[in-house]
Image: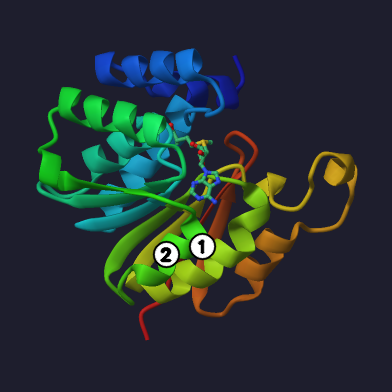
Amino acid sequence: MGPLAYVAEFAIEDEPLLTARVNAADLGGTTPIRPEVGATLRFLAAAVGARTAVEIGTGCGSSGIWLLRGMRPGGVLTTVDTEPEYQRMARQVFTRAGFASNQSRLILGRAHEVLPRLSDGAYDLVFCDADPRDYPEYLTAALRLLRPGGVVIFNDALGADTGSEEAESDEVPELTSLVRADDRLVSMLLPLGDGLLAAVLRSA
Ligand SMILES: C[S@@+](CC[C@H](N)C(=O)[O-])C[C@H]1O[C@@H](n2cnc3c(N)ncnc32)[C@H](O)[C@@H]1O
């Protein structure tokens, strides 16, 4: 077995995560994060000691459970999605996973309308898991929302401007080049899924 296969088997989904996955399959239209991405989110949330996090793309709650499991006890996840039924399922699995109702703030709406209402510098972590074409816009929002030392993470980052036709292009995708070129950020790109891109906002 190659290392990436071991990586894929390292993280195991328990009952609440499996329920979230089944719910997502039943409803259709939303894809839960892979377990190895979840373990990475949990690790990063713990590493930055996250008390507050923003998620774009609640889905049926898989990534939210992983994030909450890495955050400090009592941490609060603010999570945005356009689909009420997904968020209803997410609320159920957060409870099933043992989180109090005041640990998740589920906001229904389009991210570009919701994010401007969130406070500057108030978040330890921002996780983006929606349409990769919107990621450059979410990067700008994350730079405003994060406190120094906070981390921004993009799932499927290499889908950001490849669409699919240009996936074979040698050009560096816009999102990755934006992140890499920004002196305020210390970044890494992991070969998980279609690229998991993470960056820490440097302290001044
Ligand atoms: C890949 S799924 C998220 C999966 C989720 N993170 C999980 O692990 O279960 C993408 C989600 O983004 C939501 N979405 C797409 N565009 C959005 C937007 N502009 N604002 C908010 N949510 C959006 C979709 O409704 C969908 O649930």
Q: Is residue 1 visible?
A: yes
Residue at mark 2 to residue at mark 1: CA–CA distance: 6 Å
Q: Please name the residue that numbered disc 2 is placed on.
A: 115
Label 1: few (<14), some (14–19) or many (≥20) C-alpha neighbours in 10 Å = few
Q: Residue at x 35, y 58 (%)?
A: 125
Which quarter of the figure is the N terminus placed in? top right
Label 2: few (<14), some (14–19) or many (≥20) C-alpha neighbours in 10 Å = some
Amino acid identity at mark 1: His
Residues at badges 2 and 1 in contact (C-beta under 8 Å)? yes
Would you say the beta carbon of the disc 1 residue lies within 8 angstroms of ligand 1?
yes
For the residue pair 197 and 5, the one nearer the viewer reads as 197
Q: Circle 1 sits in a helix, a strand or a loop, which is it?
A: helix
Q: Position of residue 156 (x, y in %)?
A: 61, 42
Q: Is residue 108 left or right of residue 134?
A: left
Q: Is residue 73 left or right of residue 78?
A: left
Q: Residue at x 61, y 46 (%)?
A: 131
Instruction: Tally the numbered discs.
Output: 2
